[in-house]
Amino acid sequence: MARPQQFDQKQVLNSAMQLFWLKGYANTSIKDLTDATSLMPGSLYGAFKSKRGIFVEALDSYFENIYTDVSEVLESDEPALKRIRLFFEYVLHQMEKDQAAKSCLMVNTLLEMPANDEEINHRITAMFEKMEALF
């Protein structure tokens, strides 16, 4: 019987997301991930199966965070012009944070991953379509 996880999965995914966001998928090693998450390799593989597994979950977490923030603004009861203004204020706020140096994880992933990676391309396309539907 496997032992229960003894770590905060949300915190681990956030640490991994920050690392992938900063270094990219190809330049992030398992050692980088274990250092950033404070997990042993066995725990990392046990929880996420592979580097790709933690990457996919971190990418999904990134999107859900962004989507939640943007949908709150764009689906509010405010007049349309104010919602647009609030959206751009949100974008500017994100750019003013240190995160701006990292660009957008979704765009970075689209540019970095091979075009024949159907799973990632499908996932990114679905994310952009869901975001576009808010407008």
Image (spheres, helix red, strand yellow):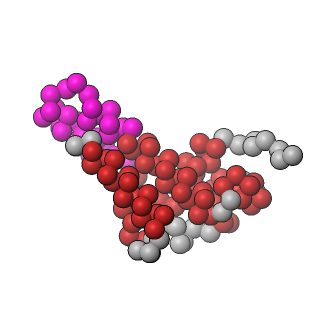
Instruction: Kindly identify the residue that appears in the image at 59 percent across and 63 percent down.
Output: 52
Quadrant of the image occupied by residue 44: bottom right
Q: Is residue 67 visible?
A: yes
Q: Position of residue 130 (x, y in %)?
A: 34, 47
State the predominant SS element of the stretch in magenta: helix
Q: Is residue 67 above or below residue 32?
A: above
Quadrant of the image occupied by residue 46: bottom right
Drawn side of residue 30 relative to residue 116, left or right:
right
Q: Is residue 80 above or below residue 31?
A: above
Q: Is residue 95 magenta?
A: yes
In terms of depth relative to the viewer, which is nearer, 125 or 14? Answer: 125
Drawn side of residue 104 relative to residue 91, left or right:
right
Q: Is residue 34 visible?
A: no
Q: Position of residue 88 (x, y in %)?
A: 22, 43
Q: Position of residue 61 (x, y in %)?
A: 50, 47
Drawn side of residue 112 relative to residue 56, left or right:
left
The C terminus lies in which quarter of the figure? Answer: top left
Q: Is residue 120 magenta?
A: no
Instruction: Kindly identify the residue that appears in the image at 37 percent across and 42 percent down.
Output: 67
Q: How many marks?
A: 0
Numbered range of the magenta stretch: 68-97
In terms of depth relative to the viewer, which is nearer, 132 or 33? Answer: 132
Instruction: Kindly identify the residue that appears in the image at 24 percent across and 40 percent down.
Output: 87
**As drawn, which residue projects farthest toward the left?**
81
In terms of depth relative to the viewer, which is nearer, 131 or 105? Answer: 131
Q: Position of residue 40 (x, y in %)?
A: 76, 57
Instruction: Kindly identify the residue that appears in the image at 38 percent across and 54 percent down.
Output: 126
**As drawn, which residue projects farthest toward the right?**
1
Drawn side of residue 83 relative to residue 36, left or right:
left
